[in-house]
Amino acid sequence: MTLVQSLRIIRRLIGIDLSTAMIYRSEFLLYMISAVLGPTISLMIWRTALSSGADLPVDAEYLTTYFVLLGIVSMLTSSWISGFLAEEIRLGRLSIWIVRPGSTHFNGIANNLSEKVVKGIALVPLIGGVGWFVRDAIALPSDPARWAMFGLSVVAAAVMVYAITVMVGSLAFWLDDVTGIDRGRNLIMTVLRGQLVPLALFPVWSRDIMDVQPFRFTLSFSLELVIGDLSRRELIIGMTLQMLYATLFLFAAVRIWQRGLRSYTAAGA
């Protein structure tokens, strides 16, 4: 199958998923409110700590910009395919896709992209409202090159997260239940990608590890690009590491999936 044919299938699947997603628009709205509420509460806590004299390695502008943009960047780089993929393997529904011309990953990619569109429609106004109230403390770059790097970084981060979730979901080829592994993966990523606490607030002794560990490049690094706190050398090293990690995880996901398919047996397969 050619790339053009693959993209055509994904485009059609996106249209189907968009129609389905609109049925649950109220659920998406509630989900987006919760996605904004968490970072907003964290922002209020850290700003209060700063105003009370807390000695932090970053200032109010850094924290405000970080937490205002956290919801949208987190949504753009998220993936929820692991559970669905594991269920398809476990219940034998993967057999349906094996006999089709397109891969089940076409459906996963289409679902991921379509839900991001629907979520973005609800999320952007909410984040805009929060940003308006703290607009005096938000610092955004004016350099178009920095925004271009940010866009590329978000795409690379999304690829990394999607590949990681495919890797976890593919473990269902050999394990009956990957729920515990997926929850552990989610917990580790929530902490190490900077979704719970900015990595800049981690202890100084851990900074060297935090700067090069792969999960930083699934969220935090993209936000750091926008905040503009990185030197030219840090930008070059960071972008290089992110591209290498994205390639590595994508390659690993493909290899694990292909090996799992060779051992897959199910009714109708």
Image: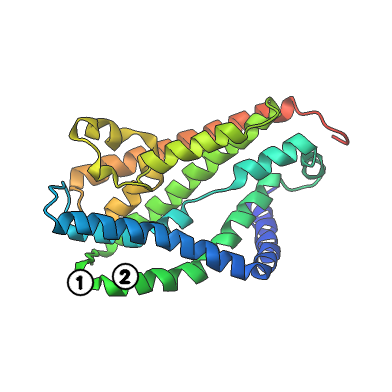
Residue occupying the point 77% across, 47% down: 101
- Asked if residue 10 lies left or right of residue 208, the reply is right
Q: Residues within 10 Å of mark 1 (few under 14, many from 20)?
A: few
User: Which residue does the numbered mark 2 point to in the structure image?
Assistant: 131
Quarter of the figure with residue 145: bottom left
Residue 76 locus on image (x, y percent): 47, 56
Residue occupying the point 54% across, 37% down: 183
Contact check, label 2 and label 1, Cβ < 8 Å: no
Most extreme residue toward the right is 268
Given residues 4 and 23, the one toward you in this image is 23
The amino acid type found where label 2 is placed reads: Gly
- Looking at the image, residue 252 lies above or below residue 51: above
Residue occupying the point 79% across, 42% down: 93
Mark with earlier residue (2, 1): 2
User: Which residue does the numbered mark 1 point to in the structure image?
Assistant: 136
Residue 97 locus on image (x, y percent): 77, 44
Residue 200 locus on image (x, y percent): 24, 44
Cα distance in 3D space between marks 2 and 1: 9 Å
Q: Quadrant of the C terminus?
A: top right
The amino acid type found where label 1 is placed reads: Asp
Quarter of the figure with residue 227: bottom left
Quarter of the figure with residue 261: top right
Q: Residues within 10 Å of mark 2 (few under 14, many from 20)?
A: some
Given residues 79 and 159, the one toward you in this image is 79
* Element type at mark 1: helix
Residue occupying the point 28% across, 60% down: 44
Asked if residue 246 shows in the view, the reply is: no
* Element type at mark 2: helix
